[in-house]
Amino acid sequence: MNMFRITAAMLALCMSLMSVPVSAGNGNVSGNPEYQVDAPPAYAMVADAVIARPLLIAGTIIGAGLFVVTLPFTALGGGVDRAGQALVVEPGKAAFVRCLGCTKDGYNNHDD
Protein backbone atom coordinates (compact mmCIF):
# COMPACT_ATOMS: atom_id res chain seq x y z
CA MET A 1 0.00 0.00 0.00
CA ASN A 2 1.19 3.47 -0.64
CA MET A 3 1.71 6.05 2.10
CA PHE A 4 -1.54 7.91 1.35
CA ARG A 5 -3.69 4.81 1.86
CA ILE A 6 -1.91 3.90 5.09
CA THR A 7 -2.33 7.44 6.43
CA ALA A 8 -6.01 7.54 5.40
CA ALA A 9 -6.65 4.16 7.04
CA MET A 10 -4.96 5.21 10.28
CA LEU A 11 -6.87 8.50 10.33
CA ALA A 12 -10.18 6.68 9.75
CA LEU A 13 -9.35 4.21 12.54
CA CYS A 14 -8.46 7.00 14.99
CA MET A 15 -11.60 8.98 14.17
CA SER A 16 -13.82 5.92 14.58
CA LEU A 17 -12.26 5.12 17.95
CA MET A 18 -12.80 8.71 19.12
CA SER A 19 -16.49 8.47 18.29
CA VAL A 20 -16.98 5.48 20.62
CA PRO A 21 -18.41 6.68 23.94
CA VAL A 22 -16.28 6.28 27.02
CA SER A 23 -17.72 3.35 28.94
CA ALA A 24 -15.96 4.22 32.22
CA GLY A 25 -17.51 7.68 32.38
CA ASN A 26 -18.27 8.87 35.89
CA GLY A 27 -19.60 5.54 37.09
CA ASN A 28 -18.36 5.14 40.63
CA VAL A 29 -18.85 1.45 41.35
CA SER A 30 -16.92 1.43 44.63
CA GLY A 31 -18.71 4.42 46.17
CA ASN A 32 -15.36 5.94 47.13
CA PRO A 33 -15.35 9.70 46.36
CA GLU A 34 -11.64 9.44 45.47
CA TYR A 35 -12.64 7.81 42.19
CA GLN A 36 -15.13 10.48 41.16
CA VAL A 37 -12.69 12.35 38.94
CA ASP A 38 -13.54 14.29 35.82
CA ALA A 39 -13.40 11.89 32.84
CA PRO A 40 -13.48 14.09 29.74
CA PRO A 41 -14.43 12.57 26.39
CA ALA A 42 -11.82 11.88 23.71
CA TYR A 43 -12.86 14.78 21.49
CA ALA A 44 -12.29 17.18 24.39
CA MET A 45 -8.81 15.76 24.94
CA VAL A 46 -7.92 16.08 21.25
CA ALA A 47 -9.23 19.65 21.04
CA ASP A 48 -7.38 20.52 24.24
CA ALA A 49 -4.08 19.07 23.00
CA VAL A 50 -4.29 20.50 19.47
CA ILE A 51 -5.98 23.87 19.99
CA ALA A 52 -6.23 24.99 23.61
CA ARG A 53 -2.81 24.07 25.02
CA PRO A 54 -0.75 25.79 22.29
CA LEU A 55 -2.91 28.92 22.59
CA LEU A 56 -2.60 28.91 26.40
CA ILE A 57 1.17 28.46 26.22
CA ALA A 58 1.38 31.34 23.73
CA GLY A 59 -0.84 33.40 26.03
CA THR A 60 1.44 32.66 28.97
CA ILE A 61 4.51 33.76 26.99
CA ILE A 62 2.79 36.92 25.72
CA GLY A 63 1.45 37.66 29.20
CA ALA A 64 4.93 37.29 30.71
CA GLY A 65 6.28 39.70 28.12
CA LEU A 66 3.52 42.20 28.84
CA PHE A 67 4.12 41.81 32.56
CA VAL A 68 7.82 42.63 32.17
CA VAL A 69 7.10 45.60 29.89
CA THR A 70 4.45 47.09 32.19
CA LEU A 71 6.26 46.23 35.44
CA PRO A 72 7.52 49.78 36.15
CA PHE A 73 4.03 51.21 35.78
CA THR A 74 2.32 48.51 37.83
CA ALA A 75 4.98 48.88 40.54
CA LEU A 76 4.18 52.58 40.79
CA GLY A 77 0.48 51.77 41.05
CA GLY A 78 1.01 48.97 43.55
CA GLY A 79 -0.62 46.22 41.51
CA VAL A 80 2.32 43.92 40.79
CA ASP A 81 0.70 40.90 42.47
CA ARG A 82 -2.60 41.27 40.62
CA ALA A 83 -0.88 41.88 37.26
CA GLY A 84 1.39 38.85 37.69
CA GLN A 85 -1.56 36.70 38.69
CA ALA A 86 -3.69 37.78 35.73
CA LEU A 87 -1.00 37.87 33.02
CA VAL A 88 1.27 34.96 33.93
CA VAL A 89 -0.04 32.67 36.68
CA GLU A 90 -3.63 32.08 35.50
CA PRO A 91 -2.74 31.26 31.86
CA GLY A 92 0.18 29.15 33.11
CA LYS A 93 -2.06 27.16 35.45
CA ALA A 94 -4.58 26.62 32.67
CA ALA A 95 -1.83 25.46 30.31
CA PHE A 96 0.31 23.28 32.59
CA VAL A 97 -1.65 22.31 35.75
CA ARG A 98 -4.76 20.76 34.26
CA CYS A 99 -5.49 17.27 33.04
CA LEU A 100 -5.98 16.83 29.30
CA GLY A 101 -9.55 17.80 28.41
CA CYS A 102 -10.50 18.85 31.95
CA THR A 103 -12.13 22.18 32.62
CA LYS A 104 -10.80 22.71 36.17
CA ASP A 105 -7.21 23.54 37.18
CA GLY A 106 -5.20 21.16 39.29
CA TYR A 107 -4.59 17.45 39.48
CA ASN A 108 -7.43 16.52 41.86
CA ASN A 109 -10.48 17.39 39.77
CA HIS A 110 -13.13 15.93 42.07
CA ASP A 111 -16.87 16.59 41.71
CA ASP A 112 -17.11 18.40 45.05
Image (tube, grey):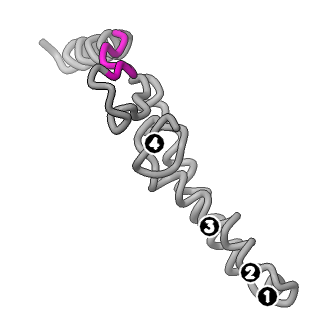
Q: Disc 4 to disc 2, how far (Cα)?
A: 29 Å
Q: Position of residue 30 (x, y in %)?
A: 27, 25
Q: Quadrant of the N terminus?
A: top left
Q: Residue at x 31, y 19 (%)?
A: 24
Image height of 21 relative to 55, above or below: above
Quadrant for residue 3, please give it. top left
Mark sitting on residue 109: 4
| Label 4 Cα neighbours within 10 Å, binned few <14 / some 14-19 / many ≥20 | some
Q: Which residues are magenta?
A: 20-28
Magenta stretch: includes residue 92 = no
First along the sequence among labels 4 and 2: 2
Residue 111 versus residue 14: which sits nearer the camera?
Answer: 111
Residue receiving disc 2:
80
Q: Position of residue 102 (x, y in %)?
A: 48, 37
Q: Amino acid at mark 4?
A: Asn
Q: Residue furthest front?
A: 31
Q: Residue at x 40, y 28 (%)?
A: 39
Image height of 35 relative to 85, above or below: above
